[in-house]
Amino acid sequence: MPGRTPAAHTLNRPSYPVVKTLAAAAGILALAMALGLYLGVPGPVVIATIGAAGLGALVGISELVSRYTDSPERALFAWAGLLYIAVNILAAGTAFGLAHGFDLLKLSAQSLPARLLTEALVSGLGAMAFFRSAVFTVRVGGSDVAVGPASVLQLILNAVDRAVDRERARPRAEFISRLMNGISFNAAADVLPRFCFSAMQNVSAADQQALLDWIKVIRSDSETDDDQKSLLLGLRLLNIVGDKVLESTITGLGPRIRLSLKIGLGTLTLLNQIRFETSASPLIAICYALAQGSIAVDREELEQRVAAIGRQHFDDGVDNSVKVLLLASELLKAFGDDVVGRAVAVIAPGLPAQPAPAAPPPATPAPAAATTAAPTTATPLPATPPPAATAPAVPPPQTPAPAAPPSVAPTTAAPASATPSPATSAPATPPTAAPPPAAPRPSTQPSATPSSAPPPQAPEDPEH
Amino acid sequence: MDAAIDKEAAAVLNQIPAEGATVPLLAGSTKMAAERVEAAVGRLHSLRLIERDGPTVRLTPFAQKARNMFSIVG
């Protein structure tokens, strides 16, 4: 969709450059070595301890990364994630200390490098096995609870879950609501997952099938509307492929999965009455007020895009209408038809004499055309059982507009507020409400359109 | 009632080709009765979204542009 910047779509990510992380790790290692040497521990043993602790860290990191696939760095740098990794490091380091200090593996006969390497590997991986074991399992409230060292890590993992969820939920929701705005669920459900999976290459068959099965289920869910289904699909895909792939895929598929913007007839009519120059800024302000803060679109960014529309210049005859429609497009994307329609209704009546310029042109063709117009509208109707009822009711709204240019302006200005329109509602309702009038056609038409158009309307019947 | 009329008016509006159409033609393309099409046409005309020239109705330039950009609903 035009006007969207990629930056607006990407999820907020922590700024932890790789260099900073590596520098911090190197600093910690240097500190550990210095401490070990200070305490009189031989250099190779310190290095082996760091190696074992590193193995523990790797196990913890890999567990977190596999658990939070859409943004693993968030989990790694959350305080609970760091605690989880620290516990793993501590366990592995302690295990190495015990194994080496008490020669638990009975390797004293081996050379020092062989002994240290074996002890580092066994303690690094063994500590993880120990911390993931349980002495027994208790069933509490319908769920199995492992009792043993595993429960310690599970507690920390739960804390990581909550911390990451709290931190990730909001940006994920905002990202998906922006990204999936205007996406057709039916079109996207067919092609978007396959496109994402093909782009990723390494999504497991089980994950793919699980998503396709979920799509089948939600497609048949009649209680969820298409917009909600689109959001749910976006969230599911975000978990599997991440934000960048999802965003680029949606951008790539473009109009194939995107719905055209919807605009109500009333909104469109009101837009026809405003001028871009005087209405753009108030409209934005009113839309934001009506949306009551539930809009994630940045106001400054929206105002800049609208200002850019204002700087464009189109052909004189269409300049205002094109700009107004472009403005409407931006507002509809951000707020939807309901809010935009209400906002335009606030502004439109305040603009004087807007409808006037539109009325005059039809004036000249009208009389000539009217001779054919009336018959065609009238002739098909006699075929239906209550002919007289429908025929008189229809012409009035049409004849006043073209035939009486200057005087029509005030009356036709009213339709802008679609519902109350005196001139339009009258003709629309009578057909059903006035079956009896048998006399109508010749008599009502002249009387309905007082001075101008009616005379030429009755006579011929060209083709229909 | 107005909502129903607007819905039909939007359906009619979406069926008017660039070169214009007649009521019977619109009745055929929208599968609506001629009198309902007439009411819809009257509504659209009063809203200044179409121009009427004898048997032919045409979209106003504004409505034509809007239809190219948006999906118009009632």
Image (cartoon, grey):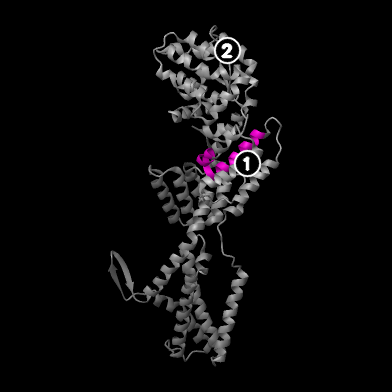
* Residue at figure coordinates x 44%, y 55% from the top left: A207
The quarter of the displayed image where residue A331 is located: top right
- Residue A280 image label: 1
Question: In the rendered structure, which segment of residues is drawn in magenta?
Answer: A320-342
Q: Is residue B49 visible?
A: no
As helix, strand or loop, the secondary structure at mark 1 comes to: helix
**Reading the chain from its start, which is encountered first: label 1 or label 2?**
1
Neighbour class for label 1 at 10 Å: few (<14), some, many (≥20)?
Answer: many
Give the amino acid at mark 1: Ala
| Position above or below: A173 against A320 | below
- Residue A451 image label: 2
Relative side of A121 to A283, left or right: left
> Magenta: predominant secondary structure element?
helix
Relative side of A328 to A219, left or right: right
- Residue A459 image label: none
Quadrant for the N terminus of chain A, please. top right
